[in-house]
Amino acid sequence: MPNTTYSVPEKLGILIATEPIFTPSIFQHITNLKPGAGGEYQLTDAIQVLLNHEAVYAYAYDGIRYDCGSKIGFLKATVELALRHPETKDEFKKYLSEMHQTSAT
C-alpha cells in the first residue's frame, strides 16, 4: 500500500481519501523517474526513492472504505452517508422503502 495521507471526518467516521501530501523534494524524485508498468510514470516509484531520504507517513485507517472512483462504490458511500446523517436519514429511509415496494410489484 502506498504511503498516503487521508483525512477522516470524525463526526461520521467515514474515510475520505484525498491526494497524498508530500514535501517539495518529491518533485526531484518525480523528475528522475523512468517509465514503469505500461510505459506510465508511477508515483509509487518516486515515493519509494523518497523513503531513502526522508520519512513518509501514512494513516492506517480502520473502518469501511468505499471506492468512490467506481460507480457502485460512489453509490454505496452516498447511501451509507444519507442513512447516517441526522438531516437526511429519516426521509431517505422512507424513500428507499418506497422504492423497494415499487420495484417489488
Image: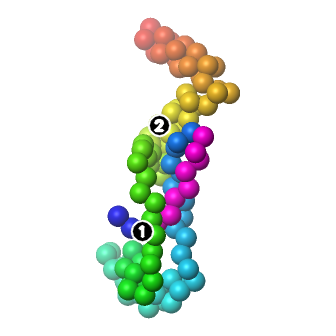
- Residue at 51%, 90% in the rendered image: 28
Query: Residue 58 appears at what percent x and percent y?
Result: 45, 65
Q: Is residue 86 left or right of residue 3?
A: right
Mark 2 surroundings: few (<14), some (14-19) or many (≥20) residues within 10 A: some
Residue 40 vs 87, above or below: the answer is below
Query: Residue 81 appears at what percent x and percent y?
Result: 56, 35
The label nearer to you, 2 versus 1, is: 1
Of residues 63 and 71, which is closer to you in this image? 63
- Residue at 42%, 43% in the rendered image: 64
Q: What colour scheme does the image use?
A: rainbow
- Say which amino acid is labelled 1: Asn
The secondary structure type at the circle numbered 1 is: loop
- Quadrant for the C terminus, please: top left
Residue 3 disc label: 1
Mark 1 surroundings: few (<14), some (14-19) or many (≥20) residues within 10 A: some
Per the image, is 35 magenta? no
Disc 2 and disc 1 in contact, CB within 8 angstroms: no
Residue 76 disc label: 2
- Say which amino acid is labelled 2: Lys
Of residues 30 and 51, which is closer to you in this image? 51
- Quadrant for the N terminus, please: bottom left
Range drawn in magenta: 4-11
- Residue at 58%, 15% in the rendered image: 94
Q: CA distance from mark 2 to mark 1?
A: 25 Å
Residue 40 vs 31, above or below: the answer is above
- Residue at 47%, 15% in the rendered image: 100
Res. 48 visible in picture: yes
